[in-house]
Amino acid sequence: MNTADLGLPVTVPSTALFTDRYELTMLQGALRSGTADRRCVFEVFTRRLPEGRRYGVLAGTGRVLDAVENFRFDSGVLGFLADQRIVDEATLEWLADYRFRGDIWGYPEGEVYFPGSPLMRVEGTFAEAVLLETVILSILNHDSAVAAAASRMAVAAGDRPLIEMGARRTHELAAVAAARAAYVGGFTSTSDLAAGFRYNIPTVGTSAHAFTLLHDTERDAFTAQVDSLGAGTTLLVDTYDVAEAVRMAVEVAGPGLGAVRIDSGDLLLLAHRVRQQLDELGAKDTRIVVTSDLDEYAIASLAAAPVDAYGVGTQLVTGSGHPTCSMVYKLVARAEGPGADAPLVPVAKKSMGGKASLGGRKWAARRVDADGVAEAEVVGTGEVPADLVDRQLLVPLVRGGEVVAREPLDAPRDRHRAARAALPMSATQLSRGEPVLPTHYLP
């Protein structure tokens, strides 16, 4: 249930100022020069994956669609632009009626990607499409970085569930987006209630060390928690002495104790000792949850340990060392002149230093071998080869300004699992390596 279900008013904030000033000054210049209405094609892609990563994970598409839908210049936003003299009166009048009326195509959320993959294609007039650059990149760069880290952690965890618990390690709004992206990448739950409320992600949580320290004894704390939440709760056992806490936890909750959580120390050693102790106490079904600055490597190192679930915070919400995907939003084609029928011509940046881009409106497909295993990402601007027609990756997201690709969050989560499973086995290696698929360009 959300505020709409309760009959309360829902105010959807404008996303129009989630942008850089130069988007608006470019618009003003284009309006003056008469080029603002030229039909254009922008594409989102990355020139390289973060160092050592073998695949990327696209996340945030659903949030992009929300942002595009709410990209409106209301009276408050227009007043700010006028007060700050950011654009002239003619541009303000144009912005007052703005809404995106073009088309957006893209890889479906949860899909894997590689260098050069045209992850999103925005088609419309220059004026309406250029304004979306910053907000699209802001969402996709952040969410895809978190989802990629989550995917690697999910691979390391195997069938053991992962709990997202990074809210206190990032901006409060970024925490909600990170929980969503982590769920797409393979996490099963979050500690963040805002994420649970907004995206219907399962939420979990019981107590921190402060709850134990609040009480006169550890036994008092455990008793209070079990009385409040039931024997199926998770008790935190590393505030003082772990072995004593485990013994006391089973005494208080009984052998039906749900779980114990270990948040410090040598997790590998402690997990084995705690498992043996729990079994000896008759709590054979009590699970062990470990936390404490985990990343994919730490999770992999615990693969042989009797651990039942992992809680991950800092490393997840910061992309496990790679907090951005370096995606860019580039103009790749524009009409030769005004009018909807003017032919498109490719345009491209020719910068030095690895920043050149390829012009032309692109399609993308994934070639697979006889066993259905992916073997190459194929990107082109001409006709799609017959053997790749049914393997194309871009799908319609927005048509004529209307969103056409809403889906529940479990859809990109399931899609990612399937896409990752279709990659060569080396994709799941945590060791540093090159992208697991080459990108082939066709004219």
Image: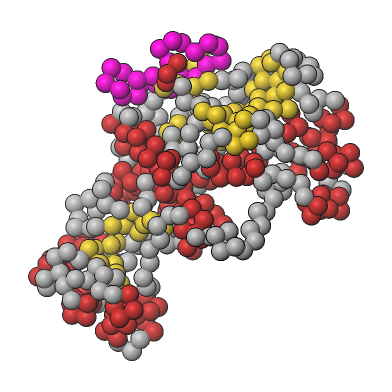
Quadrant (top left/top right/bottom left/bottom right) for the C terminus: top right
Residue 336: image location, x then y, percent: 75, 15
Q: Is residue 65 above or below residue 230?
A: above
Residue 199: image location, x then y, percent: 48, 53
Q: Is residue 386 magenta?
A: yes
* Image-based side of 361 in relation to 432, left or right: right
| Residue displayed at 47% across by 63% down | 193
* Image-based side of 337 in relation to 129, left or right: right
Q: Is residue 423 magenta?
A: no
In depth, the one of 294 and 73 nearer the eye is 73
The span picked out in magenta is: 367-388
In depth, the one of 39 and 345 nearer the eye is 39
| Residue displayed at 45% across by 31% down | 113
Residue 434 visible from this viewpoint: no
- How is colour applied across the structure in the image? secondary structure
Residue 268: image location, x then y, percent: 22, 59
| Residue displayed at 37% across by 82% down | 213
Residue 153 visible from this viewpoint: yes
| Residue displayed at 81% across by 49% down | 78
In depth, the one of 336 and 9 nearer the eye is 9
User: Most extreme residue toward the bottom, as rendered?
Assistant: 216
User: Most extreme residue toward the right, as rendered?
Assistant: 89
* Image-based side of 340 in relation to 85, left or right: left
Residue 408: image location, x then y, percent: 46, 44
Total number of numbered discs in the rendering: 0
**The quarter of the displayed image where residue 68 is located:** top right
Q: Is residue 298 above or below residue 434?
A: below
